[in-house]
Amino acid sequence: MNRIEGPKGRIYPVHNPKTVALIGMGPSFHDFLNETMTQELTPEHHDEVWGINMIGNSMRCDLVFWMDDLRIQNAFKPGLIQTLARNQVNVMTPTKYWDLVPNSFDYPIDEIGHLA
């Protein structure tokens, strides 16, 4: 996996898609499945699939945004985090825990905030 060093020495995964399918746990998930199952989804539809939370354990994703603390989630439901780690997907989360999810990365909240 390609990684780059960002501000403050933070490490980030390299993603450079032109189009993204962002899938959450509501209507976007149902719409994505419907288009896939009815063969309406074309290869040009998206370059990457980005999932939010449990979507990362439910379908193949290129990047997952898991905005709950991984350590707290692991104490509550360890199977969730073990599955996330086993999937080897890049995970953006408030605090990376490489001991739990080796492909976890700190969400760049400061950098995003400066864009506003």
Image (cartoon, helix red, strand yellow):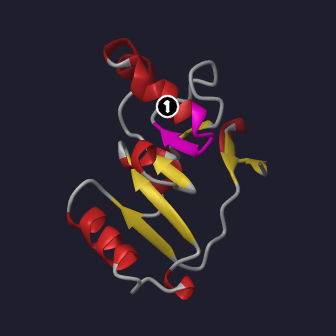
The answer to whether 67 appears left or right of 13 in the picture is: left
Q: Magenta segment, which residues?
A: 86-93
Identify the residue at horizontal 47%, vertical 55% (top origin): 112
Q: Is mark 1 on a helix, strand or loop?
A: helix
Characterize the local packing of mark 1: few (<14), some (14-19) or many (20 or more) Cα atoms within 10 angstroms: some
Q: Is residue 40 above or below residue 14?
A: below
The residue wearing badge 1 is: 83
Looking at this view, name the residue that lies furthest to the front.
38
Quarter assignment of residue 29: bottom left
Going 25% across and 66% down the picture, which residue do you hit?
30
Out of 79 and 48, give the one closest to the viewer: 79
Residue 59 x/y as whole percent: 44, 53
Q: Quadrant of the C terminus?
A: bottom left
- Is residue 90 magenta-colored? yes
The correct choice, above or below, for 47 with respect to 115 in the image is below
Q: Which residue is drawn at 47% across and 59% down?
A: 50
Q: Does the magenta stretch include residue 98?
A: no
Work out which residue is located at the far left of the displayed protein and give it: 27
Q: Residue 8, how many percent across, how many down?
A: 67, 38
Q: Which of 54 and 11 is in front in this view?
A: 54
**Tag 1: residue type?**
Thr
Quarter residue 31 falls in: bottom left
Q: Where is residue 85 in the image (x, y as percent from the top left)?
A: 57, 31
Instruction: Locate residue 34: give its quadrant.
Output: bottom left
Query: In the rendered view, does 112 fall on the left or right side of 15?
Result: left
